[in-house]
Amino acid sequence: MTQTEDKITLSTEDTPLVPMEKIVSLSKRRGFVYPNSEIYGGVSGIYDFGPLGVELRNTIRRYWWWSMVQTNDNVVGIEGNIITHPRVWEASGHVENFVDRLVECKNCKRRFRIDQLPKENVEQNKCPVCGGELGEPRVFNLMMETYIGVVEGERTKTYLRGEACQNIYLDYDNVLKSSRLQIPFGICQIGKAFRNEVTPGNFLFRQREFEQWDLQFFVHPSEMQKWFDYWRERRFAWYKGIINHKDRLRLRPHGPDELAHYAKQAFDIEYRTVLGWQEWEGIHWRQDWDLSRHSQFSGQDLSYTDPETKERYIPWIVETSGGVDRTFLNLLLDAYEEEPPSGKDKEGRTVLRLHPWFAPVKVAVLPLQKNKEELVTTARDIHKRLQRLMVSQYDDVANIGRRYRRQDEIGTPFCVTVDFQTLEDQTVTVRERDGMTQVRLHINELPAYLLERVMWNYS
Ligand code: ATP
């Protein structure tokens, strides 16, 4: 459900849920997210990312990659293409089954996905907004079509991939043959996916072009349950580790009516926002479905031979599938806070309490005054040194309090201020975003002090 009121609402646990409008407005004002093709009126469900947005996306991608690929010896990464052979989407079932069923209200003309309507509205054929009568369901395929080739009549119709993970199945055999991996092992990928969503909306939550991340973990069938449990717990802990509001995260098992025919079980990792409890990542029991289908459709044998026992089998797969965009959105919704005036800050402030790892700008370097040349030169010099290690911003516009607030609003965890004492003893103040506490450090101590706090893999 979309929240339209421009005020913070209280959830049942009395914790404030941030209205989407606050995030949409901050995103545009400060350069996180812009509507795509805005000067032409925009395209629904398609967005561009601004200077801060692209930094945030990079940190999100890097952290996922670091924890899934870089630090697991039995997991490797690939980068597959958006366009593939069209048969891929027949084998995957997308051409036939990747559909949404939609109903339109005869009175207010709003459209709803049947699977997202409350049960009583489906049973009574009643619009959940105005109570009007709902029309006949219509079926829409979500795949976006495109063509390979230039000569009319000789062009081949194919699709922009509807899910990124298919490349992993396509490259599975090549990865196996070109590396020394043995089952159990995993392949990861981050990449764009495209869906003609029939009800795009809720800002970045449901877009037509978005970026997914997947792990496909290949196992012997006898070890499926063990690895399914393992990755479910690891992925849940991963999400718990990156948010402030831990009580807004849950694991929801799929009911029997939601399970694919080959799946013994499935879970959604869900996060609660003004949209209610919504999927953030899916943990799926894919069994041998994908590799068997691609074996069948391509005519290539994708079975695996155990090097020791010589047993031959199609590996079973545990899939964890989430994405950059919902992580981006949920992190902003989780981190956004409007603080009332207090002893430390007389005007009140908006603060993004992002984990320092994710902050688009890690440090801001601020000369106390911009009309004192020595302060400016020293601050610029510090900024240049820090820039080699992390994203640093130099800012000398407006008074120092205003500059702190500007940085708080975009989540910058540390501000380094160069003042008159700096010129005497080479020390600076480091102000920390959340508690607004300050410490005084020698300039040479800054790199280690900051790296320790902003890098997840620093020790
Ligand atoms: P939903 O039920 O919300 O439509 P889904 O079950 O179709 O999602 P999957 O196909 O399992 O989603 O995709 C895996 C992940 O990709 C989701 O958990 C989500 O993080 C992301 N995702 C899927 N569709 C979108 C979209 N339209 N916009 C942004 N992210 C998406």
Image (spheres, helix red, strand yellow):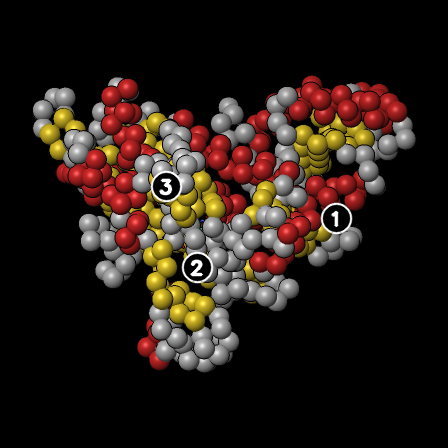
Of 192 and 439, which appears nearest the observer? Answer: 192
Residue behind mark 1: 344
Give the image quarter of residue 404.
top right
Q: Is there any visible trace of residue 239 in the rendered image?
A: no
Whole-Å distance between the Cαs marked 2 and 1?
48 Å
Q: Secondary structure at mark 3?
A: loop
* Residue 251 percent location from the top left of the image: 36, 53
Of 295 and 129, which appears nearest the observer? Answer: 295
Mark 3: few/some/many CA within 10 Å (<14, 14-19, 20+): few
Of 99 and 147, which appears nearest the observer? Answer: 147
The disc, 1 or 3, on the residue closer to the chain's N-terminal end is 3
* Residue 263 percent location from the top left of the image: 22, 50
Whole-Å distance between the Cαs marked 1 and 3?
70 Å
Residue behind mark 3: 153
- Tell me the amino acid under the disc marked 3: Gly
Q: Secondary structure at mark 1?
A: loop
Q: Is residue 451 above or below residue 103?
A: above
The disc, 3 or 2, on the residue closer to the chain's N-terminal end is 3
**357 to the left or right of 233:** right
Residue at left 29%, top 25%? Answer: 175
**329 to the left or right of 448:** left
Mark 1: few/some/many CA within 10 Å (<14, 14-19, 20+): few
Q: Secondary structure at mark 2?
A: loop
Residue 198 — which label? 2
